[in-house]
Amino acid sequence: MNLYKINKEYSLFLFFFNIFILFTISEVLDSKEIEVPFKNIICFFLISIIGVSHGALDHIKGYKLMEIYKINNKYFFYPVYIFCCLLVIFFWIIFPSVTLILFLLVASYHFGKEDSCVGNIIKKRFINLFYLFKGSVVVVAPLFFHTEETLQIFKILGDNLILIHENFLISLLIISFIANFTIMQWSNNGSFFLADWVTIFTLNVFFSPLVAFTIYFCFLHSVRHSFRLIYEINNKNFKNGFKKFLKKALPLTLVTAILFVVSVFILTNYYVLDDAILKVIFIGLASLTFPHILLEYLIEKNEK
């Protein structure tokens, strides 16, 4: 099974499928006639099931980390992981603006790095900074094309500090493109990175921030990460690896989805449904992203 070939073909498929959507049914998918709560509910369930599934094997990586640190009880991973999730939520409640900004920076770096994971990147100085700028298109593009709507989402999440100048956003988009192109040049087989960047960019031109993010997060970022996990499970037979991946990922994916749904029901006692969904999506993702990235970092560090 050629992981690079699978990712390249998928990126090109997503790129041309994105073009097809833009010229055919984009107005239907993002129509103002469709009520916002309904669109948000669809995005919520896609993210809760497809989006978070690529992190549903963290417990297996956690077991591996327990072995590295010579911790006999592998189930010790669960309370530590849950504690990290709760700690992020706690900080978001106490320091919402700071935590949001930190989350946007960490998420940008994570997207930039993980979406490049199959490119066999040649290690260069300041490579992590390039990953940050490469992935920043996911955050900067909606801010540029849908400024008021994106800032309104930030406000719902508890931030009143972020003020963005249009020229600054244009500069960041240019830097993001340059970083993406540079990483592509540093890669032995990352020719599809450009298609990915253009896909993310065009999604944000034509779709609202949440819809664009949902399509990217579920069908590009999550799928690409899942391809790598499937390859690690079985690098000979994709179909067999996919079946094993589903079997391993399903339990924690369902648990996470149920927790997300319960959280929305609880928050609807204090906020309107639309706001409750946005809070659960992004604060929930933040609470999962930080320990997920920390786990990836510790494993990568100890494998060197």
Image: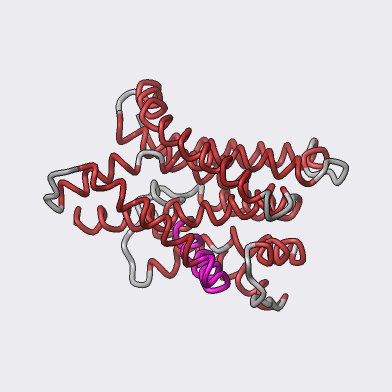
Viewer can see residue 290: yes
Q: Residue furthest right?
A: 33
Q: Residue at x 66, y 51 (%)?
A: 276
Q: Residue at x 19, y 56 (%)?
A: 302
Q: Is 35 placed left or right of 176 in the picture?
A: right
User: At which x and y percent is residue 42?
Assistant: 68, 38
Q: Is 257 placed left or right of 274 in the picture?
A: left
Rendered-image quadrant of the N terminus? top left
Please tell me whether residue 122 belongs to the stretch shown in magenta: no
**Vertical side of 50 occupied by 81: above or below:** below
User: At which x and y percent is residue 289?
Assistant: 44, 54
Rendered-image quadrant of the C terminus? bottom left
User: In which quarter of the view is residue 54 placed?
Assistant: top left
Q: Magenta span: helix, strand or loop, mainly? A: helix
Q: Is 171 placed left or right of 148 in the picture?
A: left
Q: Which residues are magenta?
A: 92-110
**Vertical side of 190 occupied by 227: above or below:** above
User: At which x and y percent is residue 228?
Assistant: 38, 39
User: In which quarter of the view is residue 250 placed?
Assistant: top left
Viewer can see residue 180: no
Q: Nearer the viewer, residue 103 or 265?
A: 265
Q: Residue at x 63, y 51 (%)?
A: 267
Q: Residue at x 64, y 77 (%)?
A: 161
